[in-house]
Image: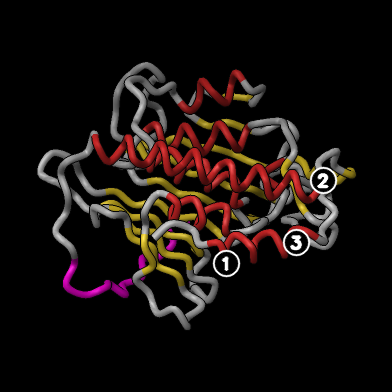
């Protein structure tokens, strides 16, 4: 079912009284509003299959291939888990994200998932280098300002594969306390297994590296006290209008994507409750 008028009204009510603040860098902005993710998937036709009275949310795609689990009571550091079941021509894959990952960054990935995939996708490390991140020779990128790393690893943990060589690699993203000279305490993580489509990883890191600030309310939780916040030129009404316009675009893109993806996965008999252990 699409996002209902009642759900949109609840989003608008929450943001109507909040004075938005430009918050940067993005990796320290904090989780924001999870509905950037869940409303986007609902607009694309995903449905909730978990207990409506539970804090845990499980959304499943119309073709039953993909599922997203949000568990704020998780016993591990992974609050978000995204899965794809294998098909006759494509492998399954798995990605997970920590509590403080900004919802807008995760939402850029789920937007890419429900849209028609691009013919070509840029290499994530090339995108980060273009954004001013420092790239080392082992397949790691370091943010500027500091505090976030993106690492490319082979399935065996060797990150020495040359950039131009096609290989099945996993991607690890971590935000750390920027006040430490070396890697400080981890604030949040993202992990993509070796079968995660590259264009999804690219969507995630492109939004992560964007220098534009994210919008947060005055008392919203951030990932670190060193985050920079300034009054935003946007009004609360404009924030809500942008959210509604995005949902309209997602519905259109998801419709096009479904027309190009005729193959479906057999619906599961019972919703799985198995929890994957966090990789980091």
Tag 2 secondary structure = loop
Q: Which residues are magenta?
A: 268-280
Q: Position of residue 276 (x, y in %)?
A: 36, 65
Q: CA distance from mark 1 to mark 3?
A: 25 Å
Residue 168, quarter of the rendered image: top left
Magenta residue check for 270: yes
Dot placed on the residue nearer the N-terminal end, 1 or 3: 1
Residue appearing at x 72%, y 47% in the figure: 239
Q: The N terminus is located in which quarter?
A: bottom left
Q: Nearer the viewer, residue 140 or 64?
A: 64
Frontmost residue, 136 versus 228: 228
Would residue 227 be visible to someone looking at this image?
A: no
Q: Is residue 70 above or below residue 197?
A: below
Q: Name the N-terminal-most of marks 2 and 1.
A: 1
Residue at the front extreme, as displayed: 5
Q: Position of residue 99 (x, y in %)?
A: 58, 62
Q: How dense is the environment of label 1, judged by Cα within 10 Å: few (below 14), some, or many (20 and up)?
A: few
**Between marks 2 and 1, how big is the CA–CA gap?**
22 Å
Residue 69 in the image, given as x and y percentages of width and height? 41, 64
Which residue has dot 3 on it? 221
**Residue 14 against residue 22 in the figure, above or below:** below
Task: Name the mark nearer the viewer: 2 or 3.
Answer: 2
Front residue of 150 and 62: 62
Q: Please name the residue shown 64% across and 23% down the image.
A: 131
Q: Residue at x 82, y 58 (%)?
A: 18
- Taking the view exactly as shown, the residue that stands out farthest to the right is 231
Q: Which residue is mark 2?
A: 235
Local secondary structure at mark 3: loop
Residue underneath mark 1: 6
Query: Horizontal placement of 231 versus 223: left or right?
Result: right
At label 3, counting other C-alpha atoms closer than 10 Å, the crowd grade (few under 14, some 14-19, many 20 or more) is some
């Amino acid at each position: 079912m699409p996002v209902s008028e009642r759900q949109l009204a609840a989003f608008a009510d929450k943001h109507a009284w909040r004075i938005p603040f430009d918050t940067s860098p993005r990796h320290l902005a904090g989780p924001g509003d999870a509905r950037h993710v869940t409303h986007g998937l609902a607009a694309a036709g995903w449905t909730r299959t978990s207990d409506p009275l539970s804090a845990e949310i499980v959304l499943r795609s119309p073709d039953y291939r993909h599922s997203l689990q949000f568990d704020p009571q998780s016993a591990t550091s992974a609050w978000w888990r995204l899965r794809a079941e294998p098909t006759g021509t494509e492998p399954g894959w798995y990605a997970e994200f920590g509590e403080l990952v900004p919802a807008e960054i995760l939402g850029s990935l789920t937007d890419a998932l429900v849209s028609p995939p691009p013919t070509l996708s840029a290499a994530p490390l090339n995108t980060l280098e273009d954004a001013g991140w420092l790239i080392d020779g082992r397949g790691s990128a370091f943010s500027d300002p500091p505090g976030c790393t993106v690492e490319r690893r082979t399935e065996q943990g060797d990150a020495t594969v040359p950039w131009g060589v096609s290989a099945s690699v996993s991607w690890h993203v971590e935000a750390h306390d920027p006040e430490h000279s070396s890697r400080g305490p981890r604030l949040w993580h993202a992990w993509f297994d070796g079968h995660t489509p590259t264009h999804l990883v690219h969507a995630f890191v492109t939004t992560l590296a964007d220098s534009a600030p994210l919008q947060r309310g005055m008392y919203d939780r951030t990932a670190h006290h060193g985050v920079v916040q300034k009054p935003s030129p946007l009004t609360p009404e404009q924030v809500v209008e942008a959210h509604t316009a995005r949902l309209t675009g997602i519905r259109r893109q998801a419709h096009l994507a479904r027309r190009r993806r005729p193959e479906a996965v057999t619906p599961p008999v019972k919703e799985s409750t198995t929890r994957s252990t966090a990789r980091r």
